[in-house]
Image (spheres, rainbow, N blue to C red):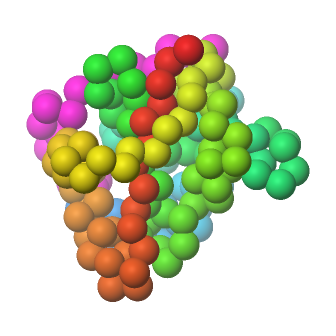
Amino acid sequence: MSDLPRIDPSRNLTRPARAYAAVLRTPPGRWLAINVASKVDPWLMRTSRGKVGMGLMLPSALLTTKGAKSGQERVNPVLYFHDGDDVIVIASSFGRDKHPAWYHNLKAHPDVRIAKDGGGAPRTAVEVTDADEIARLWSQADRIYPPYANYRQRTDAVGRRIPIVRLIAG
């Protein structure tokens, strides 16, 4: 199992990462992320032990949850960053109308793991609900992935609030 590299949201994105994020903001880039990367990344990241994924230079890892209904293990690529010892993930679903399936899974079964290769130490998922904390974490999330602002506009238009989830060690 690979470790989860520490992602400091106060650091600026590299120029290539900003360019890649800009591509993902376009309709073809968004389509590629939704229809190809989200399906191929679990295999790529597991096979390469976390060294290769379609997220390229973005801070991505594999989140392992239990299915909300089935209890079966589910693995999904997510973007993440650190807040102290905790890992923060955003249930954006690319700004679509519904929450991603992994969000429903961790709400039903909050014991999760996250790592570059799909393993990782056990963590507990807790949704962030405090308005000031949400605002602070959004400002950090926007630094690691600028398209989040566009995703919020999309979901606001349909009345969906994008959840922010804190993954607590232990």
Name of the residue lying farthest toward the bottom: 157
Q: Identify the image quadrant of the C terminus.
A: top right
In the rendering, at what x and y percent does residue 88 appear?
39, 36
Q: Which residues are magenta?
A: 1-21
User: Which quadrant of the structure image shows residue 48?
Assistant: top right
> Quick check: 79 above or below 21?
above
Q: Which residue: 32% across, 27% down?
A: 82
Q: Nearer the viewer, residue 24 or 79?
A: 79
In the rendering, at what x and y percent does residue 10 appear?
14, 32
Q: What count of labels does the image hold?
A: 0
In the rendering, at what x and y percent does residue 74 appear?
74, 43
Residue 4 colored magenta? yes
> Quick check: 162 above or below 90?
below
User: Which quadrant of the structure image shows residue 57?
Assistant: top left
In the rendering, at what x and y percent does residue 41 appear?
59, 45
Magenta segment's dominant SS is loop
Q: Which residue: 33% across, 68% down?
A: 151
Report the side of 108 relative to 4 (left or right): right
Residue 17 at least partly seen: no
Q: Which residue: 49% across, 63% down?
A: 93
Residue 157 at least partly seen: yes
Q: Which residue: 36% across, 17% down?
A: 85
